[in-house]
Amino acid sequence: MSILMVNEQYDFNSFKEILEVTDGNLASHLKNLESSGYISFDKTFVGRKPMTNYSATAAGKTAFQAHLDFLENLINENKT
């Protein structure tokens, strides 16, 4: 989600490369995010090769920001 917060869209192979994960692992995570309504995808072809681009939805951006806010509050509450 952090990648999609700073990029309008991101393709599957670029995700795989930057995250250094397997196809199956990435597909599983993306499917869960899509099922939750946090991301959407668009399948196209570049020449004869399929390309899948992902984008964060408004709900996904809101949920991710809430997650970041929670983490920040947690860190600030536990400072000594």
Image (cartoon, rainbow, N blue to C red):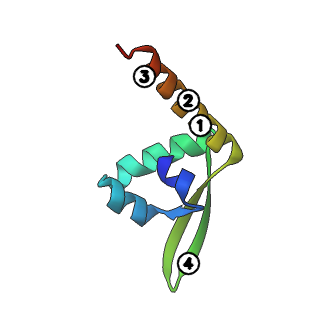
Measure the alpha-carbon separation of dots 1 and 3.
Answer: 15 Å
Q: CA distance from mark 1 to mark 2?
A: 6 Å
Quarter-of-image position of residue 61? top right
Q: Secondary structure at mark 3?
A: helix
- Does residue 37 show up? no
Residue 23 x %, y %:
36, 56
Q: Nearer the viewer, residue 51 or 57?
A: 57
What kind of residue is marked 1? Gln
Mark 4 = which residue?
A: 45
Mark 2, residue position = 69
Residue at 41% x, 65% y is 14
- Location of residue 42 in the rendering, given as x and y in whole percent from the top left corner: 62, 64
Which image quadrant is residue 18 in? bottom left
Looking at the rendered structure, the kind of residue marked 4 is Phe
Amino acid type at circle 3 is Ile
Q: Earlier in the sequence, mark 2 or mark 3?
A: 2
User: Which residue carries the number 1 mark?
Assistant: 65
Q: Residues within 10 Å of mark 3 (few under 14, many from 20)?
A: few
Q: Which numbered disc, 2 or 4, marks the residue closer to the eye? A: 2
Q: Residues within 10 Å of mark 2 (few under 14, many from 20)?
A: few
Which badge, 1 or 4, is on the more N-terminal residue? 4
Say which mark, if any, is on residue 50: none
State the image coordinates of residue 17 (x, y, percent, origin top left). 33, 62
